[in-house]
Image (cartoon, grey):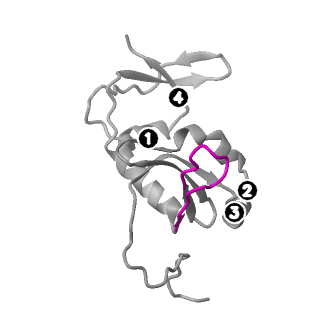
Amino acid sequence: MNEKFVINANLLRKEPEFGTRVCVVEKAEAVTHDKFERLKRHPMQDNELIAENTDLMFCDVNNQYHCLLIYDDDQDDGLLIESEGAPYARYAPYIPNAKLLYENHMQRHLQKMKFYCPLEISRWDDDEYNARSCEKFSVNSPTVIKNDVVERLEKQPLFFHSIQ
């Protein structure tokens, strides 16, 4: 086994500069390795996932490109796609480790997530089809962090309802 770090990349020869664009990921979709390989090998073929999301991809008045990120759920690499309304990958750079980049972004974003809606959390009893009280905690502080809530939610199945 090779212990060296390996990156899949497009190597460009003697580029005078690396012109980049601001790309906003409007949606990220994990696909199977086979589907990703098919898209990677045939980016100009119509793709159902791209076609379903054409409304999310455009260039806005600030010259920012709103894109769809499709990544390989097994191998982690991805394509950042702006189709300009087409059902294929009209503009698409290859993004090494796209899954990791996206998940890191989401983790940082979720750490900052705040709950402003007061909630009461109860366990759902499937046999009786009724909500039954259990350990309750209030989520109405703007400083409650996602990990604290997730830790409590993982302990038991829950039913959410808003406190009025």
Q: Quadrant of the C terminus?
A: top left
- The residue that label 2 is drawn on is 45
Q: Nearer the viewer, residue 150 or 92?
A: 92
> Which numbered tag is attached to residue 150?
1
Q: Is residue 16 magenta?
A: no
Q: Earlier in the sequence, mark 4 or mark 1?
A: 1
Q: Is residue 79 left or right of residue 21?
A: right
Mark 3 element type = helix
For marks 3 and 1, the one nearer the N-term is: 3
- The residue that appears at 32% across and 40% down in the rendered structure is 145
Left or right, 155 with reference to 163: right
Distance between the alpha carbons at the discs numbered 4 and 3: 34 Å
Q: Which amino acid lies under the numbered mark 2 shown in the image of this protein? A: Gln
Examine the rendered structure and indicate whether residue 114 appears above or below residue 25.
above
Q: In the image, residue 69 lies at what x, y percent?
A: 54, 53
Residues 122 and 162: in front is 162
Does label 2 or label 3 sit earlier along the sequence? 3
Alpha carbon separation for disc pair 4 and 2? 44 Å
157 w.r.t. 90: above or below: above
How crowded pointer 4 is (Cα within 10 Å; few <14, some 14-19, many 20+) is rated as some
